[in-house]
Amino acid sequence: MPIDEFEHLRERGLTQESVYRGGLVKVRVDTVALPDGEICNREIIEHPGAVAIVPLTADRQVIMVHQFRYAIERITLELPAGTCKPQEPAEATAKRELLEETGYEAVCWNYLGNFYVAPGYSTELIKLYLATGLTQATVPSGDRDEFLETVQFPLPETLAMIKDGRITDAKSIIGLWWVAFAADR
């Protein structure tokens, strides 16, 4: 079905007002015209984009990180990931983040695809990579404000952890399922 068939759903931007500019995100309020002509506001979080990596060892162990997430007041189990720096290619971000967060480097990098985190209010797009041919290069360092603990699990166990609620991070769920079922495509 061609996407043009749904143009009647498009909203038209009228104005934009910047309401916050932080170190990572910007927030703006857009006034838009709805398809029926009504006017309303959309609150948008502008994000520079990010990457997530599924580091998979030769024996199909997934390297993950435990990290405290202040916004939800929980320690999460996640795939290594990070925000793209200005003008930094996504694959370079993925290589940098894998090394910083896990201490590993990869010989093979496969781009799996991308997804929007929350398209109802955010521009954040995560590009997902599979990293294989892994070697431990250094001790994980993380960013100055990042405290991580690296762990490994067999890929099938990570899927069970998704099902039983031990993995709740969306990018990790998407990445792990994508890799687990890529052979089925």
Image (tube, rainbow, N blue to C red):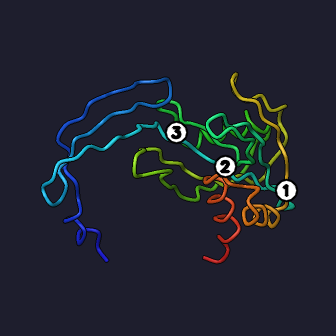
The front one of 60 and 27 is: 27
Query: Amino acid under label 2?
Result: Ile
Give neighbour class at mark 3: few <14, some 14-19, many 20+ (Cα, 10 Å). Answer: few
- Image spot of residue 91 (x, y percent): 58, 44
Q: Is residue 40 left or right of residue 74?
A: left
Q: Describe the element under mark 2 as helix, strand or loop.
A: strand
Residue nearest the viewer, comparing 162 with 61: 162
Amino acid carrying mark 1 in the image: Phe
Q: Which residue is mark 1?
A: 153
Q: CA distance from mark 1 to mark 3?
A: 29 Å
Q: Which residue is mark 2?
A: 53
Residue found at the very far left of the displayed protein: 37
Q: Quadrant of residue 179?
A: bottom right
Amino acid type, callout 3: Pro
Q: Are marks 2 and 3 in contact (CB under 8 Å)?
A: no
Residue at image point 67% right, 74% down: 183
Would residue 47 appear left or right of 136 to someone viewing this image?
left
| Picture disc at residue 89 | 3
Q: Give how far across and how far down residue 34 sits, in percent.
A: 19, 55
Q: Quadrant of residue 182?
A: bottom right
Please tell me how crowded label 2 is: few (under 14), some (14-19), or many (20+) other residues with Cα within 10 Å. many
Residue 66: quadrant of the picture: top right
Question: In the image, is residue 18 above or below residue 68?
Answer: above
